[in-house]
Image: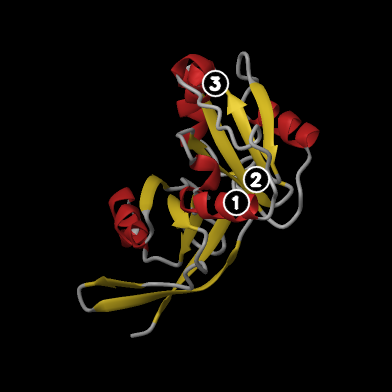
Amino acid sequence: MADELAEIMQNFDLSSTELQATSLGTEEIGGGIQECKISLIEKIMGERASNYTGVKNFVTTAWGYPKQLRVVELGLNMFQFILPFESDRERILQGGPWILDNQMLVLNNWYEGIEDDERVFCLAPLWIQVWNLPVHWISKEAGKKIGSIFHHVRDVIIPQTGGKEGRHLKLLVMVNISKPLLRGTIVKVGDVTKWASDTKYGPLMGHVSGCRRMNLLAIV
């Protein structure tokens, strides 16, 4: 950023008045910092530009009408959500995935410089379905172990009813969305090896949660 600013300034013939720097201290920016500390920063990961009204209407409904919510547009597909109550911020961060028009909303607590930090928007929650496991392999502990190939496992759900395709696990995992989604993984129990492959997107889970399906096929 400093190099870019220096290059821009070299292209201008500035007057002595324009060259005078204005120093800002805590007294001037303190109020802005305090407001940012009670906010979430969101980046919409997708090629289509989202409009302010659509985003505001979506989050207001999806997040259960949080009290005193204010929405500020910071740039293309980047928004700030001012939420005075910490309980609302924590609930929203631990919820999701949040999907608007098939584009993922990635949220983080504000910190100074977050607007220019692309890395912080790489991790996002995603539901994964794990299919074709032997019935005695289906447990929350097994789900957490299988999900360890991802950055973090938030939750494991075992649906109580099966179907024609059998029973399966649902994992809520944190995924690095800057990299291609995994096509599979090897799962072993004793001498039995399974290959997690034939991945595809499955149905939505809940009102906003994208779900990716992972079929486990025997190779022994």
User: Which label was assigned to residue 210?
Assistant: 1
The residue that disc 3 covers is 32
- For the point 72% across and 30% down, the residue is 56
- The first of marks 3 and 1 along the sequence is 3
| x, y percent for residue 29 | 52, 20
Asked if labels 1 and 3 touch by Cβ distance under 8 angstroms, the answer is no
Tell me, for residue 46, which label it has, or none: none
Instruction: Indicate which label's residue lies in the foreground, 3 or 1.
Output: 3
Q: Say whether marks 1 and 2 touch (CB < 8 Å).
A: yes
Q: Residue at x 55, y 32 (%)?
A: 21
Q: Is residue 70 left or right of residue 49?
A: left
The Cα–Cα distance between marks 1 and 2, rounded to whole angstroms, is: 7 Å
Amino acid on which the number 3 mark rests in the picture: Gly
Looking at the rendered structure, the kind of residue marked 2 is: Ile
Q: Quadrant of residue 219?
A: bottom left
Instruction: Please tell me how crowded label 2 is: few (under 14), some (14-19), or many (20+) other residues with Cα within 10 Å.
Output: some
Q: Residue 99 — which label? A: 2
Most foreground residue, 201 or 152: 152
